[in-house]
Image (cartoon, rainbow, N blue to C red):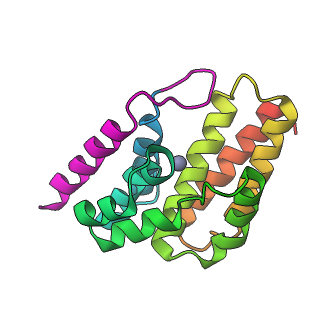
Amino acid sequence: MNTHKRLLFAASFAAQRHTGQNRKGERGEPYINHPLEVASLIANIGGIDDAEILIAALLHDTVEDCGVSDEDIRRQFGEAVAGYVLEVTDDKSLPKAERKRLQVEHAPHLSHGAKIVKLADKISNVTDVTDSPPADWPHERRVEYIRWAESVVVGLRGVSEPLEAHFDQAVAKARIAFGS
Ligand code: ZN
């Protein structure tokens, strides 16, 4: 399969697997908007055209949130894509606070490709929490989310100057919005 076909197959696979899921924000956007945005940020802001990274970006939440097996990703999209997706997948058997702590701890040790996916993921999430915060998140929780995302990104820096600058802008916008 050529690159265009693989990318479209991955986008379609992710859309099917995320069917019926919505983002947590008050706008309740279809979940698929998020992985599409993550892949687009990598390509269009990061200027990165590595197909394995872009496909991993499209699929990055399918193991964690849709019950897709890593074996399924490996069989359909190959070893490199499956590796990146697994690197950015939280262990859901752990309590939430522990998973968040581990993201900070693991970030500097991720592969180059997984760091890029995670960085774009954090840009998308910080932007969403700013523009469409979950209605049940009090102000303090929104501010705390931005702080945590910043602490994860500390460990991801050095992979893409334009993506890092874009993250910093997203955080600056969040600070203004939240008055923090
Ligand atoms: Zn994500």
Q: Position of residue 141 (x, y in %)?
A: 82, 37
Query: Which residue appears at 48% of the width and 40% of the height?
Result: 34
Q: Position of residue 69 (x, y in %)?
A: 38, 57
- 78 sits to left or right of 108: left
The magenta stretch spans which residues?
Answer: 1-29
Q: Quadrant of the N terminus?
A: bottom left
Query: Which residue appears at 67% of the width and 35% of the height?
Result: 129
Q: Quadrant of residue 55?
A: bottom left
Q: Give the number of marks.
A: 0
Q: Position of residue 56 (x, y in %)?
A: 38, 59
Residue 50 can be seen, yes or no = no
Vertical side of 101 occupied by 20: above or below: above
Vertical side of 94 occupied by 136: above or below: above
Q: Is residue 27 magenta?
A: yes
- 119 sits to left or right of 100: left
- Decide which of 61, 52 is in the foreground and name it: 61
Q: Is residue 64 magenta?
A: no
Q: Position of residue 7 (x, y in %)?
A: 25, 53
Vertical side of 8 occupied by 161: above or below: below
